[in-house]
Amino acid sequence: MLKIRGLRKQYGKHIAVDGVDLDVRRGETVVIMGPSGCGKSTMIRCVNRLTEPDAGEILVDGKSILSLDDQSLREFRRTVGFVFQQFNLIARLNVLDNVMFHLVLAGVPREQAEARARKALAKVGLESSEHKHPANLSGGEQQRVGIARALASNPQLMLWDEPTASLDPILIGEVLDVMEELVRTTNTTSIIVTHEVGFALKVADRIILMDKGKVVEEGSPRAIFADPQSEVGKKYQRLIAS
Amino acid sequence: MFRFFRDGLYRDYIILILVTIIAGAAVSSGVAWAVDVYFGDTIQEMIGDNGEFDLILHIREASEEAAVRELERIAQQQYPGAVISKTISLAGQVNYLFGFPKEAKTAETFSRLPSIFNAVPGLNSYTVIVEPSVLVRGVHPSISDTLQQRFNQIGGVSFAFRDGKNMLIVLEGAEHSKRVMNEVKQILKDYQVLEIRFPMGFDVDVQSTGDAVIQLLRKEYPGAKLANVSSTEYGEELDALMKTLVEMRHFLLSYASKVTIKLAPGSTVVMGEQIVVQGLSQQVPASGEEAASDHVVIEILEVNGDQAQGMIVSGSAAADGGVLTQPGYEYLSESKIGKPVGEVRIENERYRLNYAIEESLRLLRELDGLSVEAALAVERADKVLTTFQEALMQLEVLQVQMQQLNKGLAEKGAQSTSEQLIISLFINGLLKSIAKSGSETAEEFDLDQLENLDIASMRSSLESIAEQIGSIQEIDVQAIIDQVSDIRDSLPDLDDEEIGKSVRLVDNYIAGQVIPGERIQILVEKGPVDTEAVEPLIRSRLQNQYLNVYSIAAGTVNPDTRTEVFRILKEVRATIAGILSIVLVGVFLILDHATIFSTLKWFRANQKQPRHGLAKLMNPVALFSAAVGAAVLAATYWLSRAAVPYVSMATVAVIGMGLGAAVGIFSEKFSPVRADEIMAGLALGLNNAQIMHEIVIPDGRPGLLQLMNRAKQKF
Ligand SMILES: Nc1ncnc2c1ncn2[C@@H]1O[C@H](COP(=O)(O)OP(=O)(O)OP(=O)(O)O)[C@@H](O)[C@H]1O
Ligand SMILES: [Mg+2]
């Protein structure tokens, strides 16, 4: 479904993503791991062009994403759910509005949008909080709103950029549970950037290891952590063992 | 960058710019208009409707009641139909407006203003505000009559009259104002007052010097009509101060010790130079040595041949008898004593004055006693005279009796008896002795001579002496003594050194200044005389390099008070509008446009590589914001009919550019971007317009932008 070839992104002299190739099949759950600053976020943002890559090719269902015009790009983005590390909720809007406003702006009638939003909120267990504002929610709840917002557009592809990285350990669990549930019950294609090794082992169809802007290893979770080939892989192996 | 404005945002932004301009112009001209109306009303309140009142009478608060009664009397009896109205009062003074009835608004009335109102109690002064009129200020008295006649002949002029140094030209209607003003200016151009000012201390005979100048100018300007119109009055307060200072300088100098230097042959001194004498010091000055601190230093004030005048600048020289004569020496740098210059004579005027006062006090005290004694003496003389006269009369009787006795004796017989002889001898002796007491020259005594004494005239002269002595006694001699003592005590207790310093101080202050009165004014008709050209000529003709020649207008034209006030108001209005439009545009840029500039910058940074250093400052957003600032401010300024003095439209545009650029460069400080929310918007497939309407603007500062956004905002 997704095909990335020779993806490159450079910030000044620093090369954040250095010629990444990646293929993701429909319905597959791919977990990307790697040390901090290795270019995971940059790469995943390039997929829906929140970051404009310098070179390379991104194809979704054979369609080049990089050559889309503004209008088509927006239409494409509406089919991709993006979950941010910092949740990126609209502080001004309540939970329900946060989950439905983009649907209304995309032309979905209000009642329909509201129904979809409520359904999405139910999936993340927040149906009772729809009138609260983000500031009055815990970090875990906020991230669940973020997930519901992504789900509300019925995405064909979900991009997760370290959804639990800014949560404290107690709250991480509730978010990971929701994510696991989603991966199990839906058939949505997912690319998940995370440092949660346990979670990766449980949900990943495939794990990609990155280091210094490059993909250094990929394979099934068991294969990678049983017999890592790369430096990074070996570090993760030791982490699991301890 | 302009990609950002797609999705209809450019339309929104143009509307925002237009709304900014209209709102800015509306608010600034609105506020300016309100100020205008407020002041206009205040003026209306202050000086009434146009043409309604002719005078403002300034009256002491305490006399208000009496003054009003008198004003009402004037209005009822002299000018029926006159209107009186109280206006604002300030600082112990109440002000009343007074308007003559229409038929009384004549030259005759206005030229009699002082006599009309002279009985108003507590009237401090009045201001003429007759409308419509043209005011000519500072009319030279020598031409006010001529000008009045000429002004009266201008079309549209009802009449002109003098009000102190001003001349008011009352118009038939306000519509004539501009034209009359121009004609008046034209008339005033025919006259010019040349003023020649002399430096301080220069005594000038106003008449002859003025005539000399006229003669000179006549040659240079044959066509001009010239008249000497010098007057000796000093109008300006500064002039009075200068005059006082000069008088004080004279006084101080006359009070200081008079120093005359008789220069030794071959010696020269110049004005300002200093010499030194021994004074009362123990130490005799010697050439080459250093002067002692109690030596007397003298500054040369004037040199005439081998005579010089000076003034003590340090040390004291009060000698007994008030005069000190000592050799003088050059006083060189570092207090060194130089060559002898001649004989210095120091006369202490204060000593002399004191002496004179002491003497007259002594005499006055004696005079008191003297007059009493003199009165007594006259009285005694009078008594003597009376006794003498009585004696004389008795003597005459005696003489007659004696003659008869002698005759009788002779008749009795030719031979005298010894008895007769004795009697005859006795009588002669007696007569002789009486005559001696009346006259010194009674050698050859003759009673007839004695009779010739003019007793009456002696008496009358005695009486006049008595009278005079009496009048001396009537004078309160003690009061005179007290007065003179007071004078002695109040004489400044200054020594020469202090006087010298004061004189120098005064000199420094008035250095280069010109004293009033020592000026000549020449009225020029059909000139004008070029002051710069004639100044050197007059200088050389009068042999004075320090005089100055000025040209003074014969008068300056102003519109009437109301027109003038409204003209100023208009300027104030335009200035307020200008300043307000700058401030408002600044505020709008910060409140509204900064949000857009920040977002624009964020989008640029997110789409391309971030820039650094100069490139950051030169970024297109700053240029764009500068252009927006210039356009918005220029348009707002123009629309609000603003005009700040000395600020041109180009300057306004530059100010706008500066404002815009500053707001552009520092936009994040005024309106920070919520990058995470924008990022979410982008990820959710919102277009730029939607991101602006739903995320950026509602998050920004409240302002026009938010107001306009209300209609578009869905959440
Ligand atoms: N907008 C940017 N401007 C400049 N450098 C950037 C920018 N975004 C990322 N980088 C740099 O690119 C490199 C890769 O960053 P990226 O965020 O993709 O790493 P990451 O793998 O997601 O790390 P982490 O686990 O900390 O999130 C880092 O060195 C980072 O400093
Ligand atoms: Mg990251």
Image: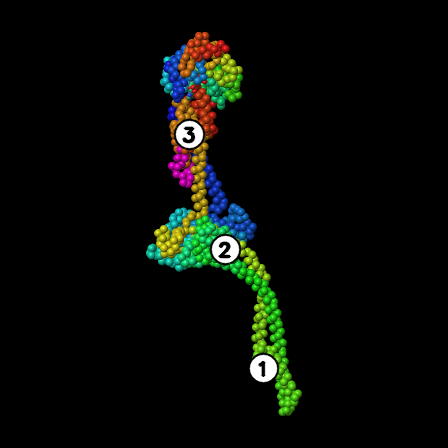
Q: Nearer the viewer, mark 2 or mark 1?
A: 2
Residue B331 visible, this angle: no
- Image coordinates of residue B4 in percent, x first then y, are 39, 24
Q: Is residue B671 above or below residue B443?
A: above
Q: Earlier in the sequence, mark 2 or mark 1?
A: 2
Mark 1: which amino acid? Phe
Q: Earlier in the sequence, mark 3 or mark 1?
A: 1
Please provide the residue range marked out in magenta: B640-657
Tell me the crowding category of disc 2: few under 14, some 14 to 19, or many 20 or more residues within 10 angstroms, Cα based: many
Task: Kindly identify which numbered label has been placed on residue B279.
Answer: 2
Q: Which residue is mark 1?
A: B445
Q: Is residue A177 above or below residue B563?
A: above
Residue B406 visible, this angle: yes
Q: Secondary structure at mark 2?
A: loop
Res. A25 image quadrant? top left
Tag 1 subunit = B
Q: Who's the residue at 46% across and 41% down the image?
A: B36
Tag 2 subunit = B
Q: Who's the residue at 45% across and 32% down the image?
A: B587
Same chain? Circles 3 and 1: yes
Tell me the crowding category of disc 3: few under 14, some 14 to 19, or many 20 or more residues within 10 angstroms, Cα based: many
Disc 3 and disc 1: Cα gap in Å?
137 Å
Q: Is residue B77 left or right of residue B421?
A: left
Q: Which residue is mark 3?
A: B664
Tell me the crowding category of disc 1: few under 14, some 14 to 19, or many 20 or more residues within 10 angstroms, Cα based: some
Q: Earlier in the sequence, mark 2 or mark 3?
A: 2
Disc 2 and disc 3: Cα gap in Å?
81 Å
Between B243 and B34, which is closer to the camera in this rendering? B243
